Image (tube, rainbow, N blue to C red):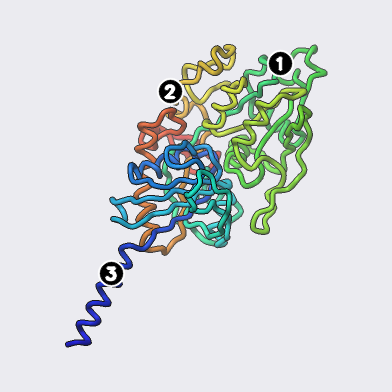
């Protein structure tokens, strides 16, 4: 009897310890979708968010490349402390993380100061991706895949680019993909523009944005990508290396590309971005332009000069051209998870999917599209759009 009582007491202690144990979740992947993912996750915490690095609780880290959050999520884990580590490293790299069990860097969960830049390493549990797993090179292990939204992409001209650039076509992208620069007259038809160059910026190979564009215009091979330093455009040559994989030259996030397009330079730049980052190009003096004669939303014109630093941009854009199939540069946003997991991670996975949908329904600004709004679909990245 004494032995049974002791075991019962130990069982009770074990249960109490389990109840108070921390839940740690590690997430990597898409930079284009980071603002939506961040808001959905912080919404799950609600008023129970007690720690945030960087910035502290209340800071808006939706555009940050790394964020660590802590608090409780009573609807999922009762009173357990939940720490969620976010490291947005690109759709392709995030897929590689899950397939190959990579250890990557996350910000520490030290919340004693507003911004602790120390890092820890851990294997991600989940990854967001702008593309299907099959579009990436990393398919050795099939991942659990759930579509959570539709991600609009845009072509934008930089602050220094000619305002006569209002449209770019599939054929023009195919021609410029490998050379990276082209005479302005190629876009305007004016002989007076023969001596003015336009430079193409872009992402490295870990980017779902890049794969989305390549799939939609049917190009392959390595693009030439330009950046500017001190106002001078140059062809990027430095490779991005992560977990022994070379992702080649290019920007590692959409926010970096947006900075290149809005920085002073000796010539104009063109680039592709997720809609959220494209907005920052517009507010920085650039402009979203037509792609194959269409824009991803109504109520905005690539021909109208900006008034009031981006006044044309609505916080609730009308994405009807995507929803009804008149604009093709979009992708499903996927949430990947390793198969066979049990416990805390699948519980979070199941909860964050509807949280993302709810966020898009109420977010300001709206930068993605709810799946329930779509009247068309596509079977693959760049695939045929059908009702």
**Which of the 4 image quadrants contains residue 304?**
top right
Q: Residue furthest right?
A: 195
Instruction: Identify the residue at image location x=39%, y=31%.
Output: 363
Instruction: Identify the residue at image location x=47%, y=36%.
Output: 60
Between the C-alphas of marks 1 and 2, the distance is 28 Å
Residue depth check, mark 1 versus mark 2: number of the one nearer the observer: 2
Q: Are marks 1 and 2 in contact (CB under 8 Å)?
A: no
Regarding mark 1 in the picture, which secondary structure is present there?
Answer: helix
Regarding mark 3 in the picture, which secondary structure is present there?
Answer: helix
Instruction: Identify the residue at image location x=58%, y=33%.
Output: 273
Residue depth check, mark 1 versus mark 3: number of the one nearer the observer: 3
Regarding mark 2 in the picture, which secondary structure is present there?
Answer: loop
Between the C-alphas of marks 1 and 3, the distance is 71 Å
Foreground of the two, 21 or 362: 21
Q: Residue furthest left?
A: 1
Residue highlighted by disc 1 = 188
Callout 2: few (<14), some (14-19), or many (20+) C-alpha neighbours within 10 Å?
some
Residue highlighted by disc 2 = 318
Between the C-alphas of marks 2 and 3, the distance is 51 Å
Residue highlighted by disc 3 = 15
Check the picture and name the quadrant holding the C terminus: top left
Which mark sits nearer the N-terminus, 1 or 2?
1
């Amino acid at each position: 009897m004494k032995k049974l009582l002791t075991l019962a007491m130990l069982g009770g202690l074990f249960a109490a310890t389990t109840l108070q144990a921390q839940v740690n979740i590690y997430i990597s992947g898409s930079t284009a979708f980071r603002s939506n993912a961040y808001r959905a996750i912080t919404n799950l915490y609600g008023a129970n968010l007690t720690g945030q690095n960087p910035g502290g609780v209340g800071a808006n880290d939706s555009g940050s490349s790394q964020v660590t959050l802590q608090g409780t999520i009573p609807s999922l884990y009762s009173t357990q402390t939940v720490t969620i580590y976010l490291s947005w490293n690109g759709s392709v790299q995030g897929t590689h993380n899950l397939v190959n069990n990579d250890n990557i860097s996350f910000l520490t969960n030290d919340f004693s100061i507003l911004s602790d830049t120390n890092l820890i390493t851990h294997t991600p549990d989940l990854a967001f991706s702008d593309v299907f797993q099959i579009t990436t090179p990393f398919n050795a292990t099939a991942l659990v895949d759930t579509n959570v939204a539709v991600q609009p992409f845009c072509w934008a001209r930089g602050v220094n680019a000619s305002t006569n650039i209002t449209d770019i076509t599939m054929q023009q992208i195919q021609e410029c993909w490998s050379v990276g620069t082209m005479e302005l007259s190629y876009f305007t038809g004016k002989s007076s523009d023969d001596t003015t160059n336009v430079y193409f910026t872009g992402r490295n190979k870990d980017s779902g944005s890049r794969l989305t564009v390549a799939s939609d215009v049917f190009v392959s091979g390595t693009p030439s990508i330009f950046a500017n330093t001190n106002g001078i455009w140059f062809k990027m040559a430095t490779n991005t290396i992560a977990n022994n994989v070379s992702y080649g030259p290019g920007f590692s996030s959409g926010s970096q590309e947006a900075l290149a397009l809005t920085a002073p330079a000796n010539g104009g730049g063109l680039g592709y971005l997720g809609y959220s980052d494209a907005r920052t190009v517009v507010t920085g003096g650039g402009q979203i332009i037509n792609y194959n004669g269409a824009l991803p939303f109504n109520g905005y014109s690539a021909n109208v000069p900006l008034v009031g630093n981006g006044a044309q941009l609505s916080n609730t854009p009308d994405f009807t051209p995507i929803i009804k199939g008149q604009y093709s540069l979009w992708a499903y946003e996927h949430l990947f998870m390793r198969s066979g997991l049990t416990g805390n991670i699948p519980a979070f996975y199941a909860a964050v999917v509807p949280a993302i949908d709810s966020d898009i329904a109420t977010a300001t600004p709206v930068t993605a599209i709810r799946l329930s709004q779509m009247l068309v679909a596509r079977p693959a990245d760049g695939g045929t759009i059908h009702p």
